[in-house]
Image: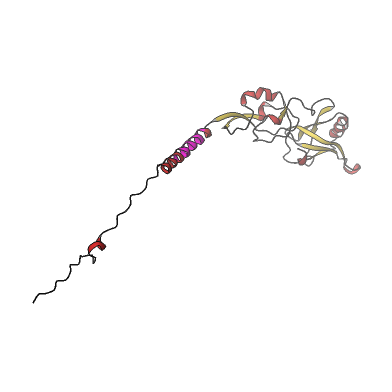
Amino acid sequence: MRTSEKPAVNAAGLSGPASRKLPVPPRERKPALAALALLLILGGALATTLLVLRSGDRVSAIRVVQQIGAGQRFTPQALEEVQIADTGIAYVSWSQRQKVLESFAAVTILPGTLLTSDMGMEASDELGPGKALVGLALKPGQMPQGLEKGDRVQVVHVPGDEGEARVLAQNALVQNVGEKGGVTVIVETGVSPAVLQYASTGQVAVAELPGAR
């Protein structure tokens, strides 16, 4: 009697066509996308290189180290040379400092400011005709602490018990602040005699006008 033979089964449990893998189609290459990616990488690297090189460019400029009031002449002590990154802003070059020293501040310039051409002017009304320089010897309490050259002040007659205080100069420019209360201000020539008269008797005080800068 013939014994029936069972069909062979492979180790994976599949036989015949089921055990064969389906062919995988080759990946389609996209040379245009690859070229675009390469261009983007190269462009980014070039831009980064240009920024690094640009940041290394330095230019000479003028920095103000002392406050200069509007209308006051620039002084050598108030200026210093600095090297800054070239940002495209037209700062005044240190090579033009002599021209700067022959000009006046158009606005009050605070310490640390980098000078630009619109901050200066060739002439000043502060020291022109009709103006006078007046020296004041002030005691503690007759001037605010921290008063600096270039500040704007009121010059006030303070008669004490003899009467009410009155303003002699509404908007005077501080030309210089010395030691021990010495202050020089620019006032109108019309009020300078009265300022000198009351200052000689210690009846003058100054009040700072921060908003008038």
Q: In this picture, is 14 found above or below 79?
A: below
Q: In this picture, is 18 found above or below 143?
A: below
Residue 178 counted in the magenta span: no
Q: In this picture, is 1 found above or below 186?
A: below
Which of 47 and 149 lies nearest the eye of the viewer?
Answer: 47
Residue at image coords 55%, 30%: 58
The segment highlighted magenta reads 41-53
Q: Main secondary structure of the magenta part?
A: helix
The residue most toward the bottom is 1
Image x and y of residue 156, in percent:
84, 38
On the rendered image, what quadrant is the C terminus found in? Answer: top right
Q: Name the side, left or right, on which 5 lies relative to 106.
A: left
Q: How many numbered marks have been drawn onto this rendered protein structure?
A: 0
Image x and y of residue 93, in percent:
62, 27
- Displayed quadrant of residue 170: top right
The residue most toward the front is 1
Which of 108 and 29 lies nearest the eye of the viewer?
Answer: 29
Which of 16 and 207 lies nearest the eye of the viewer?
Answer: 16
Residue at image coords 26%, 63%: 18
Residue at image coords 62%, 23%: 95
Image colouring: secondary structure
Which of 53 and 114 lies nearest the eye of the viewer?
Answer: 53
The residue most toward the left is 1
Image x and y of residue 168, in percent:
86, 36
- Displayed quadrant of residue 83: top right
- Displayed quadrant of residue 152: top right
Q: Name the side, left or right, on which 41 lies relative to 73.
A: left
Residue at image coords 25%, 59%: 20
On the rendered image, what quadrant is the N terminus found in? Answer: bottom left
Image x and y of residue 144, in percent:
76, 41
